[in-house]
Amino acid sequence: MKRIRRTVKTENPVLQAPQRSKKQKTFFYGSAFGKSHLQTLMDWGTLPLHVVLHIFQFLPLVDRARASSVCRRWNEVFHIPDLWRKFEFELNQPATSYLKSTHPDLIQQIIKRHADDLQYVSFKVDSSTESAEAACDILSQLVNCSIKTLGLISTAKPSFMNVSKAHFASALTVVFVNSKSLSSIKIDDTPVDDPSLKVLVANNSDTLKLLKMSSCPHVSPAGILCVADQCHGLRELALNYYILSDELLLALSSEKHVNLEHLRIDVVSENPGQIEFHTIKKQSWDALVKHSPKVNIVMYFFLYEEEFDAFFREETPVTHLYFGRAVSKAMLGRIGMNCPRLIELVVCANGLQPLDDELICIAERCKNLTAMGLGECEVTCRGFIEFVKMCGGRLTQLSIMEEVLIPDNDYNLDQIHSEVSKHLGRMWFPDMMPTW
């Protein structure tokens, strides 16, 4: 008996498409609007290498490895040297699950095959200690790498501080000893110590240009002074105030040094009254500015009002000031009198006393001021307009909450917009407090 072949009719145009040869692999993609006449055919295997390479650069390590097994062409892309010049190890999930989902030999394979290609490496970890320890384990394997940039980034609380100092120092030493061409290092909130910095200097003193190491409690003033004495090409430095010293500023001002471009100083206190802040001499600041006249000196303050006594008693060449906590009227008055190089000032909070006189003094004496931000403060409308009038069009950034401005006999909140806009030479409105 002959079998009767039954045919099934369908209204789906994709299923009715004509058959193609087995060698032709195609996929159908409809338009975003569902119009069948815009459907196009694409063969992923024929994508140009530079396009696939660009896609691979956005994938984490595990996904790169999985994609490389799709076809021979993608496997070739997986081993292109340019793919590994800049790489970020993301350990934002529990590190154990990250490593379990990776083939046990994958990391070693990549490091062994592409050690010479890894140049810009960063580790982004979450708040778990396991993630930070996993990052240290990977660092310990970077024996034959020629890394130029290294960044250790904690996305939540500083998890590297939970790693034992010996384990962290050992892993970091591997990179410092074997790279010999490090130019940029960001190791904020880590247990790096003085011996580690000496190893860094011994192997990378000719190439180091940027060092960011705020909140590193195991580094002493002598440790950072060793870096300044030997790394004459240093252009950017970020550190905590407690390791800033007159000796360090003088070392950065020596004839052997290139001009420092950026100095960031974090002044932090968690327990009011328990830290006595030292004073930097005016002569030391002057030496730095004389040697590097264009240096930006940025200071972030997270202090309580009673802890500001040591600062700005004499002229200080700071260019950018940020106050994360309340700052007194007296402190702002000293800034106006002793910070002639000031470019940017941000005050998050002050209190309930109007700052008219202090702002006018800052406008009069800080001729380079171009950016101002005020949060929980109070300024009369007349005082604020006088401040803006004195600064004029050089105020390229002006961020003031509407709640800061106090109406007076001369101006109200409806008039402030037009008056300030007139003196700035552009349209300006005060910021509004979000309602959510």
Image (cartoon, helix red, strand yellow):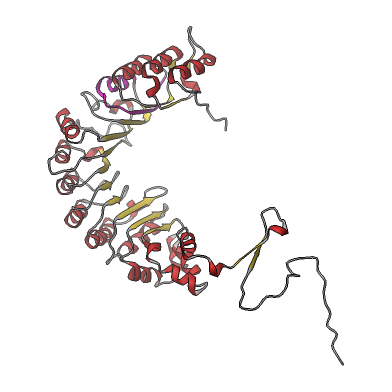
On screen, residue 56 versus residue 30, left or right, reads left
Query: Most extreme residue toward the left, as rendered?
Result: 255
Question: Where on the picture, by quarter, is residue 351?
Answer: top left
Residue ID at (50%, 68%): 67
Queried whether the magenta region covers residue 336, the answer comes back as yes
Kindly tell me whether residue 191 is visible in this rendering.
Answer: no
Placement of 236 over or under 272, stated as above or below? below
Give residue 117's position: percent from left, percent from top: 33, 64
Quarter in which the C terminus is drawn:
top right
Q: How many numbered circles are shown?
A: 0
Give residue 365's position: percent from left, percent from top: 28, 19
Residue ID at (47%, 67%): 101
Quarter in which the N terminus is drawn:
bottom right
Queried whether the magenta region covers residue 102, the answer comes back as no
Give residue 47's position: percent from left, percent from top: 53, 65
Kindly tell me whether residue 61 is visible in this rendering.
Answer: yes
Placement of 3 over or under 422, stated as above or below? below
User: Which residue occupies the foreground of this view, 381 or 161?
Assistant: 381
User: Which residue occupies the foreground of this view, 99 or 272?
Assistant: 99
Placement of 115 over or under 211, stated as above or below? below
Query: Most extreme residue toward the top, as rendered?
Result: 409
Give residue 92's position: percent from left, percent from top: 45, 55
Q: Which residues are magenta?
A: 329-351
Query: Most extreme residue toward the bottom, as rendered?
Result: 1
